[in-house]
């Protein structure tokens, strides 16, 4: 089986591609920045000027800055590649925090109280109704970037003025005090293959390891595992990092990541996470190829049955009339092999017509 991993070439991607080589016959590392998409005449995906090859499995990943390109690649490959771990909608929904929260809301995923306002003026009216401190986020951004904190109405109003000047939408979210910690659950398929608690640096509220946080492995309880897997499924992602807060009200999901870093967790986890991802990709590809083969066999058998002279088929349909004549469905002639050069005996009674070769 042949696989490709399309990415920006991060160390995590390299680690995963190397693990995939243990399972797939061929694994190609594809640099996302060298991909070009052509639409219209001679449309397709091109890599380094050449038409993108045929693969049994394609794992597409990259940062939020390339969300539209990632979604376009996936959309064009969906009907050609037997298995890909992400649906096209993933790159739109997961790379935008607002859309992530909307999807979670639709699937009853627990999360902190979240607000969105169309204008800065309207957002300021919210400041009288929220409890401080609060979190303010840009919809796009990873590794804790674009996340701000306000501990009072005056500081929040100042941030709103600054955000308004940037002419960007923003999210206001209640702050859950967890002592600067959160949980990152790595979901692969129907399982949480690893989970670790991230601890922020002193004077830093973001627990992201990329922001200087530290991590320790943790065993999740059944409820947290269920929530993590349910969130990934709601977002239609087979491989995903889910960030969860341990609040007094129970687990609350704050974010999802389609390209979770593996270097940091690799130093503290006894689990070979790249291997778990590679093995899952291989197993799902095998299933997809088996399903595809069954569909082809089914089509062949259907065609054979249509060509069998003694085969009998039934269909429930309405009749098409042309004046006083009845037009039979195409499949009837394929089975009966009626001909204009032959004669037929036609017997008719109410609700029934029988045609036999004379």
Image (cartoon, grey):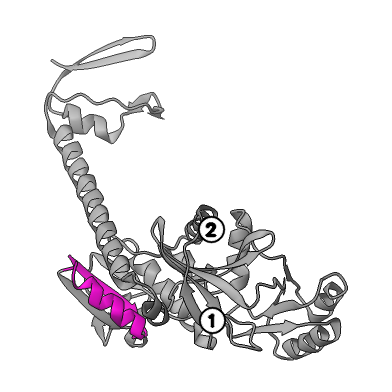
**Is 61 situated above or below 253?**
below
- Numbered label attached to residue 344: none
Q: Is residue 204 visible?
A: yes
Residue toward you, 184 or 234: 184
Q: Is residue 45 visible?
A: no
Magenta-drawn segment: 1-24
In the rendered image, residue 318 lying in the magenta stretch gets the answer no
Q: CA distance from mark 2 to mark 1?
A: 19 Å
Task: Check disc 1 and report the residue beneath it.
Answer: 208
Q: Secondary structure at mark 1?
A: loop
Residue 99 x, y percent position in the rendering: 60, 68
Residue 255 x, y percent position in the rendering: 57, 70
In the rendered image, residue 22 lying in the magenta stretch gets the answer yes
Task: Check disc 2 and report the residue beneath it.
Answer: 224
Q: Residues within 10 Å of mark 1 (few under 14, many from 20)?
A: many
Residue 261 x, y percent position in the rendering: 42, 79
| Quadrant of residue 100 within the rendered picture | bottom right
């Amino acid at each position: 089986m042949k696989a490709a991993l399309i990415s920006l070439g991060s160390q995590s991607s390299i680690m995963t591609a190397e693990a995939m080589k243990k399972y797939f016959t061929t694994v190609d590392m594809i640099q996302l920045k060298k991909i070009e998409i052509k639409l219209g005449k001679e449309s397709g995906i091109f890599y380094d000027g050449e038409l993108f090859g045929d693969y049994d499995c394609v794992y597409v990943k990259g940062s939020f800055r390339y969300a539209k390109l990632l979604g376009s690649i996936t959309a064009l490959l969906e009907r050609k590649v037997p298995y890909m771990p992400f649906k096209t909608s993933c790159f739109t929904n997961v790379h935008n925090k607002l859309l992530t929260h909307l999807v979670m809301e639709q699937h009853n995923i627990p999360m902190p109280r979240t607000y969105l306002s169309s204008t800065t003026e309207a957002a300021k009216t919210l400041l009288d109704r929220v409890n401080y401190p609060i979190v303010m986020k840009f919809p796009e951004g990873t590794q804790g970037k674009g996340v701000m904190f306000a501990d009072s109405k005056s500081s929040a109003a100042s941030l709103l003025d600054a955000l308004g000047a940037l002419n960007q939408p923003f999210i206001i979210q209640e702050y859950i005090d967890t002592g600067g910690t959160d949980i990152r659950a790595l979901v692969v398929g129907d399982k949480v293959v690893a989970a670790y608690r991230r601890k922020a640096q002193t004077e830093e509220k973001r627990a992201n390891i990329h922001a200087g946080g530290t991590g320790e492995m943790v065993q999740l309880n059944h409820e947290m595992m269920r929530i993590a897997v349910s969130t990934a499924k709601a977002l239609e992602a087979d491989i995903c990092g889910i960030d969860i807060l341990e609040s007094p009200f129970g687990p609350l999901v704050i974010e999802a990541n389609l390209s979770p870093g593996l270097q940091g967790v690799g130093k503290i986890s006894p689990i070979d996470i790249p291997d778990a991802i590679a093995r899952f990709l291989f197993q799902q590809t095998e299933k997809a190829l088996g399903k595809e083969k069954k569909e082809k066999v089914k089509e062949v058998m259907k065609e054979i049955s249509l060509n069998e002279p003694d085969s009998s088929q039934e269909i429930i349909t309405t009749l098409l009339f042309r004046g006083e004549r009845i037009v039979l469905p195409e499949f009837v002639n394929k089975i009966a092999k009626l001909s204009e050069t032959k004669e037929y005996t036609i017997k008719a009674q109410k609700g029934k017509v029988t045609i036999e070769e004379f």
